[in-house]
Amino acid sequence: MSLPLNYHVLLKKARAELNHHVGLDHLAEEPDLVKLPYLLCIINETLRLFPAAPFLVPHESSDYCTIGGYDVPSTTMLIVNASTIHRDAKVWEDPESFRPERFEGLEGEVEAYNFIPFGQGRRSSPGAGLAKRVMGLALATLIQCFEWERISEEEVDLIEGTGLTMPKVEPLEAMCKARECMLNVLSKL
């Protein structure tokens, strides 16, 4: 929610997509997610800039190999820094900017574009699909049901703290109110 709050136009675009494809008579459900490509773009771009963990699970080379011009002896521990790859100007155009549109039209192909928040190949996280669905449903529900505003004119602080999962230094504080058009749906929960 931090990034969409800093880019209110994107929040409106996601809400319009939800209104059009899901409607206002029920909450977004799992089958609706395939009809919400822009919402998925927001999630992908957020994971690109702020992966859940900056480093992928360590691996050990089974044989001597060369990676990026470096000789790697067998049994060397290899740690992939996904966060650095996701912000590499050689790989991504304008890598520090939040631009969900960069993922438009790439559904199912994003891994081919050095997008690896859950790893890649046979060693990728088996929970990646579930995680994306849960994030999609949570974000869809928050956007569909509530009007969101920052608590001040200042942008939400995105500075990362320390730790394995790189939490934000300052927790998100935002104002929300239920959308009038969703009160009927919310009252049935």
Image: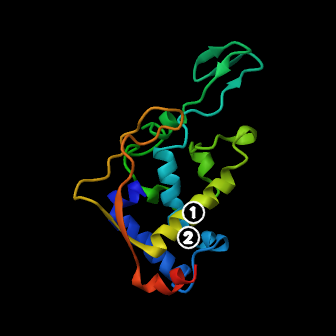
Q: With 163 as the anchor, is 60 left or right in this view? A: right
* Residue 152 x, y percent position in the rendering: 24, 58
Give the CA separation, mark 1 to mark 2. 9 Å
x 48%, y 37%: residue: 166
Q: Are marks 1 and 2 in contact (CB under 8 Å)?
A: yes
Q: Quadrant of residue 34?
A: bottom right
x 51%, y 64%: residue: 139
**Residue, disc 2:** 36
* Residue 66 x, y percent position in the rendering: 65, 19
**What label does residue 151 carry, if any?**
none
Report the front residue among 15 and 90. 15
Q: Residue furthest left?
A: 153
Q: Quadrant of the N terminus?
A: bottom left
* Residue 58 x, y percent position in the rendering: 66, 27
**What label does residue 136 carry, if any?**
1
x 61%, y 34%: residue: 56
Helix, strand, or loop for circle 1?
A: helix
Q: Is residue 143 visible?
A: yes
Q: Quadrant of the C terminus?
A: bottom right
* Residue 151 x, y percent position in the rendering: 28, 60
> Can you tell which of label 1 and label 2 is closer to the viewer?
1
